[in-house]
Image (cartoon, rainbow, N blue to C red):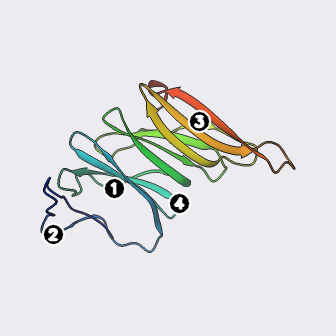
Amino acid sequence: RIAGSHFDPAGKGTAQACTIAPASQEERTRLTLVGTAAGSIAVWLEGDELRARALDRSGCGASQIHAVGRGTAAHAVAADGGALVSWVTDKGALVAAKVGKDGKPSEKGGEVAKAAGAVMNPSLAIAGGRAAFAWTEAMGTGVATRRLVLRTLELTCIP
């Protein structure tokens, strides 16, 4: 299971941990916490499904667990009072979606990039009102060298 608890400013933890997600047979990876005004949003991969859940200030679930998308290489950063998440689909495209402060994802994600072969080693950051996506990709068929690509988008352009 994924559990959460709260530590006060002196470092004293709560008496009992809350369950954020019950036990699962699927491997869980890429667990990220994004701070919000109401608490935080937990984002993780469970198998190939990207999931999100809003947490209150004590680290306990404040929403249901939401399915965001499917893929690998998930990232999450604070944005617009919630989170911006990105992941690589099974077809190798980099996509992004917003997750509200309630843990609920936007209706659909937006494709950020496709690469010859696949997007590899993606990264995500926020600067001002823009999201920066960086990744590597093959320079071409039969070429072992990779290039680094950076793309910035206005946050308002991301669904």
Question: On the image, numbered disc 1 is attached to which residue?
Answer: 65
Give the crowd class for mark 4: few <14, some 14-19, many >=20 residues within 10 Å. some
User: N-terminal of the two: label 2 or label 3?
Assistant: 2
| Residue carrying label 3 | 112
Using the rendered view, name the quadrant where residue 135 is placed.
top right
Q: What SS does tag 4 mark? A: loop
- The extreme front residue here reads 10
Distance from disc 4 to disc 1, alpha carbons, whole Å, reads 15 Å
Seen from this angle, which residue lies furthest right? 142
Does residue 70 appear in the picture of this structure?
no
**Numbered disc in front, either 1 or 2:** 2
- The residue where tag 4 is placed is 48
Specify which label sits upstream in the sequence, 4 or 1.
4
Residue at (87, 50) in percent of width and height: 142
For the residues labelled 4 and 1, say whether their Cβ atoms are less than 8 Å apart.
Answer: no
Amino acid type of the residue that numbered disc 3 sits on in the rendered structure: Val
* Amino acid type assigned to the residue bearing label 1 in the image: Ile
Foreground residue among 44 and 129: 129
